[in-house]
Amino acid sequence: MAGKPLGKDSMGIQKTMRLGDYLGDGLGQLPLNVMANLVGQLTYFYTEKVGLAAGMVATMLLAAKFADAFSDLVMGKIMDMGNSPKGKCRPWFLRMAIPAAVIIIMLFTVPKNAPGGLQMGYVLITNILLSAVVYTAVAIPYGAIMAIRTESVEERGRMGIVRTIFGYVIGMVIAILLIPITNMLGGDQGAWIKVSVVFAVLSAASLFILYKTSRETSKTAAEEEPQDTEEKVPFAEAIRMLFQNKYWVIMLLVNLLVNISYGLSTGGGTYFAKYILGNDNLVALLGAVGLLPTFIGFIIVGPMTKKLGMAGACKVSALIGAVAMVVRAFTPYSIVTTVGCGLFSSFATIPMMCLTAPMVNNCVEYNDWKYGKRMVGMTNSASSFGGKIGSGIGGSLIGWLLALAGYNAAAASQPGSVNIAIFAFAIYIPLGLFVIMAVLFHKYDLEKHYVEIVTALKERKAGK
């Protein structure tokens, strides 16, 4: 059944999404967050369970992230040039389902007793395969399909919220249960491999379902625009155009900073729990107490967006996160402060997690209005480039700071400088990132002009 007519949104733009569409689309975020969150735990796994040096691990992970970031640009161009009858985006979800499962397991099968050079080569190759190949081949089409699926800002915002809910649920499962479950299974490398198999099967199944339920239906992108339009924009020219789109540049920087913060939080929490609070199992408590503000955030992000706009909601959330970090800086050893401020910092991340992808995709219409070229794939891939560099820097900062502080996983106790390093990546650096992001969101005013832009595009197309 077709169901009741969907009507138009508050800006007068035709809606295309029903509940089943949102749920099927949102499920695609699950494998992406599985891969991202597991990568966030790799520094701890490599140093504590395999015995690799923290500084070398950090360098290998950053090298993989740089390869990953540049592969985004290539993938965006490949996607824009695609001519499959299934669409530009959908085929990639099916193609990557099995490779995603295989590489997730391979991350944790490092040959433990092999020579150091072989171990590091294995770490580098498996991380490049996961991040630069599999993750990129899913993430770029998945981000771009939002612009092809609907041109309604409201629907894109809801897609962002649903995607974030799916991703956050699996992220919280990893944050809360990964360490306790692997410890319960023996705490060794074999325990991590067993858990990775479960996540691998779940990821493959989610990508199969995403392929079956996703569609590419936006008339503006899929029907009215000639199929070869994107092919006529040379790679260097597309990059030049994007850097002249001030809103895209803002989102490039936002994605860079958000992912530095994300890399620090996902990779640093276990170290904070173990060496500052005294028990690595406390990472489950820290993750669990974040559930309440997270659910509250999901509930009110819609009303916040309606009242303040996407950029306004993100700016307020960044300021909340900054205040929470200031309080933690004065009482860094207090578990009460860590938990209490964690409630607010967890809440602060929700609007940004939900709304940055729609804000990037809104830049597609600005490209069309300014240049006559939508560049859907390049808009998402080049912006993702900043995100990948950011997550690489965030994860690597942990290893580098620990190495500079004299951290040794095999030692019975750590020098006091290790605590300072942990405070840096858990409190001080995130504080600065929140402040800078608040300034950037303040400068993003595209929503004020969006209806005018869409109206001008429709008039332009009607006049052809």
Image (cartoon, grey):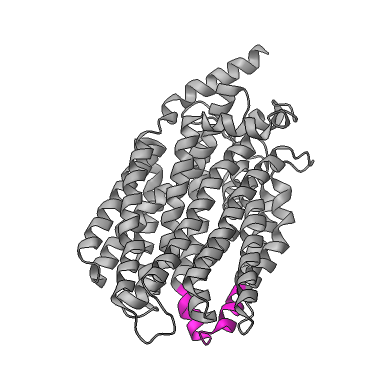
Quarter holding residue 108: bottom right
Q: Is residue 28 visible?
A: no
Q: Residue at x 30, y 58 (%)?
A: 428
Is 189 part of what is drawn in magenta?
A: yes
**Percent from the top left, x then y, of residue 317?**
33, 47
Magenta region includes residue 312: no
Residue 71, horizontal then vertical, whole percent: 64, 49
Q: Which residues are magenta?
A: 177-196
Predominant SS of the magenta segment: helix
Residue 349 point in image, percent of width and height = 39, 53
Residue 359, percent from left and from top: 48, 38
Residue at 70% over, 26% down: 225
Residue 124 lies, with reference to residue 234, above or below; the image says below
Q: Nearer the viewer, residue 69 or 334?
A: 69
The residue located at (37%, 87%) in the rendering is 412
* Residue 324, picture quadrant: bottom left
